[in-house]
Amino acid sequence: MAIMVGLIILGIFAIPATAYAATGGTISGTIEFPTSAYLLVSVNESATSSESIPVSNLTIYAMNVNTSFVNITNPNPDGTYSITVPDNGLYQIYVSPEAVGDMSRGPNNTQIYQYPNREGTRLYLLDVEGHDLDNVTIKAYAPEHWVPPNPISIPGIGGTTPIPVTPTATPEVTATETSTASTTTASPGFMAGVALIGMVIAAAAIIQRKN
């Protein structure tokens, strides 16, 4: 009986810690926005509507390139945003509308600002690996001045040659995540201790039988 109890204890705590590994996370940061923004009649033209728009009129998308899962959000009035994604993987970040006009220098001198887009001609990818990505800035660029935020690429979107993943944003484990991890994943030292107890129980049973 004692042998069986020892083996059960060993079996329970032999479950790999990876079974409790965190997935997904939150992508958060700010989006750049001109001081006097107007909707464009055309992305390639400076003509604009007559009504200005706030940054909260933009929609930010985070799409998993493998599962096609999409989550969206609208920025706060100060330009900050936060999107929660459930799974790990590469996420394409894009904005709608994909361009706005800045008329702060007058209606006849409109400056166009473009954001990462769905088509991937302005590609922005982030690698989510079970923890939050903070301080992710979505920049606005003048036409012909797009600079990829990071060297991540995938076949068929924004290029044909995969490049090693090196996200611009630095993953940071939040205090909440640390607390959650400690309650769901047994530490290696604790697991080793319990396993040792199981072995002692089994050994004691064998010695008792011999005596």
Image (cartoon, grey):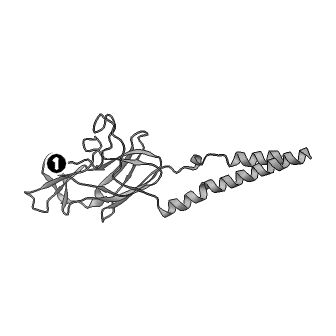
Q: Residues within 10 Å of mark 1 (few under 14, many from 20)?
A: some
**Which residue is drawn at the image coordinates 66% and 53% (left, top)?**
191
Provide residue 56's location: percent of width, then percent of height: 30, 60
Query: Depth check: 136 or 54 in front?
Result: 136
Q: How many numbered tags mark residues here?
A: 1
**Residue 14, position in %: x, y?**
67, 46
Give how far across and how far down residue 160 sits, in percent.
Answer: 29, 34
**Residue 78 sits in which quadrant?**
bottom left
Q: Is residue 62 visible?
A: yes
Residue 36 relative to residue 174: left or right: left
Q: Residue at x 71, y 54 (%)?
A: 194
State the image quarter where residue 75 is shown.
Answer: bottom left
Which residue type does callout 1 highlight? Pro
As drawn, which residue projects farthest toward the bottom?
Answer: 78
Name the element at disc 1. loop
Judged left or right of residue 102, residue 30 is: right
Residue 173 on image: x %, y %: 46, 58
Give the residue drawn at x 28%, y 36%.
159
Q: Which residue is mark 1?
A: 143
At 75% from the left and 53% from the top, the residue drawn is 197
Q: Residue furthest right?
A: 211
In which image quadrant can residue 44 be found? top left
Above or below residue 64? Residue 48 is below
